[in-house]
Image (tube, rainbow, N blue to C red):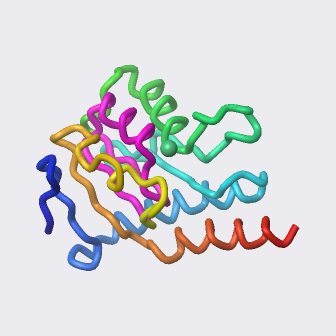
Amino acid sequence: MIISASGNIILHYLHFPMEEHLKYMKEALREAAAAAAEDEVPVGAVVVCRGRIIARGHNMTERLKDPTAHAEMIAITAATEATGGKYLTDCTLYVTVEPCPMCAGALAWSQIGQVVYGAIDPKRGFSLFSPGLLHPKTEIIAGVLAEECGALVSDFFKKKRKQ
Ligand SMILES: [Zn+2]
């Protein structure tokens, strides 16, 4: 366990092999695959509240012609619609790739209880720019199915370069 600069607890998956996290990250991976099928950068997210998936989202920046239509933004909006409140304190967001600073900011506003992500994003990940962006009470778990999550994105860009 690592405590980040902001006080967020970063639990590494290797130390916490939790079946639940695997199950929901696989659902986020399904969302990412749906993005790839639509020729979108394959990032997927689900929001889980009290053992139930209440929202799903995948990257839709091409379809919506909206650079802010990241998987997390779509999932946050869908989740608040589902709960009817603007805070997601009791919820966990699973996302295949580390959130960017924009999404981390939105997650902070939502006061989400937990963020679980797969692959790190060494170029755009929030932790690179501002590790303290998330809400101080938000717990972070990094690296769940990181290889699978990262491979989806790298395969996508490999194919793009060949086109
Ligand atoms: Zn983002």
In the displayed structure, does residue 129 sit left or right of residue 152?
left
Give the vertical position of 30 relative to 16 (above or below). Answer: above
Estimate the x, y position of residue 116 in percent, counting from the top left. 35, 57
Q: Residue at x 12, y 59 (%)?
A: 3
Residue 66 position by quadrant? top right
Residue 154 position by quadrant? bottom right
Magenta run includes residue 97: yes
Estimate the x, y position of residue 118 in percent, counting from the top left. 43, 65
Give the vertical position of 89 relative to 118 (above or below). Answer: above
- From the viewer's side, name the closer residue of 101 and 113: 101
- From the viewer's side, name the closer residue of 157 and 9: 157
In the displayed structure, does residue 95 sit left or right of residue 116?
right
In the displayed structure, does residue 68 sit left or right of residue 83?
right
Q: Residue at x 23, y 38 (%)?
A: 135
Query: Magenta segment range?
Result: 91-118
- From the viewer's side, name the closer residue of 80 and 50: 80
* Quadrant occupied by the C terminus: bottom right
Estimate the x, y position of residue 80 in percent, counting from the top left. 42, 27
Q: Residue at x 41, y 42 (%)?
A: 101
Magenta run includes residue 112: yes
Q: Residue lying furthest right in this view?
A: 163
* Quadrant occupied by the N terminus: bottom left
- From the viewer's side, name the closer residue of 31 and 163: 163
* Total numbered labels placed on residues in the image: 0
Q: Residue at x 45, y 47 (%)?
A: 100
Estimate the x, y position of residue 38 in percent, counting from the top left. 78, 52
